[in-house]
Image: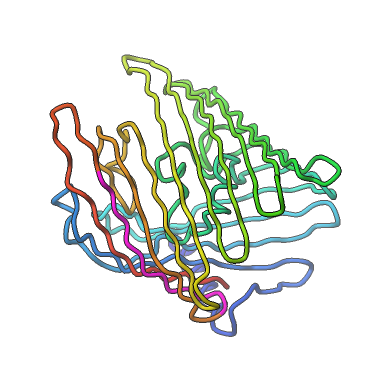
Amino acid sequence: MKRIAFLCIFLLSISVIPSFGQINLGDDATLSGRVYSDYYWVAQHHNQDIEGKNGFWFRRIYLTYNRDLNESFSTRVRLEMNSAGDFQSSAEMIPNVKDAYLKWQNENHQIIAGISGSPLFGTTEDVWGYRSVEKSPQDLYDFGSSRDFGIAFKGELGSNQALNYHLFLGNGNSNKPEIDKGKKVSFALGYDVTDSFIIEAYGDFNSKTNDPDSYTGQLFGGYQTENVNIGALYSYQYHESQLGLSARNLDLVSVFTNFKISDKAKGYLRADHLFDGYVGGSGNSYIPFAEGVESTFMVAGADLLLADQVHLMPNIETIIYGENDQNFSPDTDIIPRLTLFYEF
């Protein structure tokens, strides 16, 4: 594994020396990369063991190989490396397979077999536009994984291709091996109301053998132009009771925007509110949440374009908590960061 990690980092290094942009390997193949890194400072936190910590880290490094096999078939393999993000581990970054699929495509439809993107928050993430700063709301609160292993059907319908669909039949275990008898079915249906405005409905059922089954439903509206993006989301998830665990309902709302300030600068704002306690939130990488209380997550910052495909993005993340059953409210979390994002 260390050799694989060294090879990936070596390829990243040599690829950024000549110029920024994809590397054409010939035979309709390209190699590209993406890097999210921060200097972070935990200025204030409900967990005193974390408060005051600061440092540099790579949140994500992606290395992607794409190849067109012929007019209809193409393939992708993407490796991902990341820091642990728990403010405790000092383990080296280890690459894992993020994407690995074969895609068939005609003019309006695709069939994708292997590990590929889930329909849960693909559209939300596109309109949010700043995965380099923070995950989409559903991803941040663990409503589901960004990837699954299975077969997906995507495409556009109608005379003007205004209706978009994405059906995924998968294991329901992200990019990890299957470990139970259950499966996950997810479906997103979007409609382009205008060239700038899209609405999308989504639903899934995730059946698990040793964990409670879950159901998710959500509505999303997004507006995109060259100068401003605006998004609004409502997501609901229900976990059945099982093995002594009570049933759980999760309600999440989010609003966000990013906007052009000048040719070299943009701004972005976002606020998410989870109306229920975030079970497992204390283990959230890069930004641990208090559990058992409602939470409002906010992020604001600027995007400074230093060069083509090189972005410096100062930002600050804040989490404000409600009260628990004992009328106690955890301290507000405040984490300023200086994010460097570049592609090649």
Nearer the observer, 41 or 314: 314
Identify the residue shown where x is 55% and y is 78%: 263
Quarter of the image where one finds residue 330:
top left
Image side of residue 324 versus residue 119, left or right: left
Image side of residue 126 versus residue 25, left or right: left
Q: Where is residue 113 in the image (x, y as percent from the top left)?
A: 70, 42
Image side of residue 5 versus residue 194, left or right: left
Identify the residue shown where x is 70% and y is 45%: 193
Q: Where is residue 93 in the image (x, y as percent from the top left)?
A: 39, 60
Nearer the observer, 93 or 272: 272
Part of the protein shown in magenta: 308-320
Nearer the observer, 105 or 164: 164
Q: Where is residue 67 in the image (x, y as percent from the top left)?
A: 73, 61
Dominant SS in magenta: strand
Residue pushed farthest bottom?
18
Identify the residue shown where x is 80% and y is 48%: 105
Q: Position of residue 11 (x, y in %)?
A: 55, 72
**Count of marks placed on residues:** 0
The scheme the figure's colours follow is: rainbow
> Residue 88 magenta-drawn?
no
Q: Is residue 285 above or below residue 291?
A: below
Identify the residue shown where x is 62% and y is 65%: 226
- Position of the N terminus, as image quadrant, is bottom left
- Position of the C terminus, as image quadrant, is bottom right
Q: Is residue 17 above or below residue 87?
A: below
